[in-house]
Amino acid sequence: MIRAAITAIGGYVPENIVTNFDLEKIIDTTDEWITTRTGIKQRHIENDPKKATSDMCVEAVKQLCQKRGISPEEIDMLICGTVTPDMVFPSTSNVICAKLGAKNAWGYDLSAACSAFIYGLATGSQFIETGRYKKVVIVGADMMSRILNFEDRTTCVIFGDGAGAVLLEPSVDENGVQDFILHADGNGANFLHMKAGGSLNPASVDTVTNKMHYVYQEGQTVFKNAVYNMAEVSAKIMDKNGLTANDVNWLVAHQANKRIIDATASRMGLGSDKVMMNIERYGNTTAGTIPLLLWDYEKQLKKGDNLILSAFGGGFTWGAVYVKWAYDGD
Ligand code: UT7
């Protein structure tokens, strides 16, 4: 069997940083509340109105190509996981490829909110495993600041902007994507969504007046579902693959809330030394969190390391991917 190995990573976050103290000045919140409830200290927010999600992705993919020493023209396919596409159509994937000059690539956007990167990894790896393609790029990116209501303290403190990308190529050994378990439950839509902008509530004066183009979240319900499902699916993929806590080198978990990540690690029997964490610097970048973790921790990764990638998000969508790392990060 041909396995799909991650052979390079790129990442990008906008330069502009907004700290919890900055938010204290515009809404009724405190650094203490945000830090203890979520683990977040700051987030990167794009302040150039001309920039969009595709611009962050282009930077991430360019970096990945440079690291791997390939030209964008060598990319066969590019999948972009996002809930903040540049436009409803065409797909942000198409826009990224055009800006990059990846003229031999085709691709599409994948909508699975915070699980979009792992959904994309599972999907993209199929094109490598079948032998159809040699270079597939998976991007996870969101410019959440563009759909946040900065008068709603329950959501605007949580999210940030960022993009991460990985290159998948046929593995030369047994390393690469080993297994995945993915789930979805559309009943979760009631608790985390954006009401307007689609065919149900197309943009109108009313939708704008009623602030329907912003993230809506019932935090506690999402929290409870996230804790249970992310922990369960992470433990399940370990069990399915005969992995004990000793075998797992890293938990690479969606960065929505430090308390959710800690609960998942605890269910898996992992100490904090095996848990990748960068929520304090970026907040929740939705589809961007998992590739941004890999980007930040790349130097510490060793060939053969066992990684469990795990996410929960809007949909509800959730799942876990078991990856054997394919190269020494340093
Ligand atoms: O990535 C996609 C999936 N999303 C998630 O996984 C997020 C899951 N949910 C969460 O992480 C948490 O529910 C939140 C971080 C969103 C909220 O934390 P919480 O501990 O569930 O808080 P809560 O909603 O129960 O609110 C507790 C209190 C409330 O005040 P009262 O009613 O007790 O007086 C809120 O009004 O905290 C208040 N509050 C705030 N206070 C200061 C809510 N937001 C803020 C804020 N600053 N920013």
Image: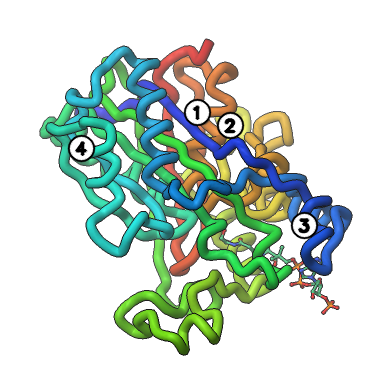
The answer as to whether callout 3 falls within 8 Å of ligand 1 is: yes
| Dot 2: element | strand
Say which mark, if any, is on residue 306.
Answer: 1
Q: Of the residues under marks 2 and 1, which one precedes in the sequence?
A: 2
Q: CA distance from mark 1 to mark 4?
A: 26 Å
Residue 282: image location, x then y, percent: 64, 43
Q: Amino acid at mark 4?
A: Met
The reply, left or right, for residue 217 in relation to residue 154 is left
Tell me if label 2 and label 1 are in contact, CB under 8 Å. Answer: yes
- State whether residue 282 is above or below residue 36: above
Q: Residue at x 41, y 31 (%)?
A: 59
Q: Of the residues under marks 2 and 3, which one precedes in the sequence?
A: 3
Q: Of the residues under marks 2 and 4, which one precedes in the sequence?
A: 4
Can you tell which of label 2 and label 4 is closer to the viewer? 4
Q: Amino acid at mark 2?
A: Trp
Q: Residue at x 40, y 84 (%)?
A: 204
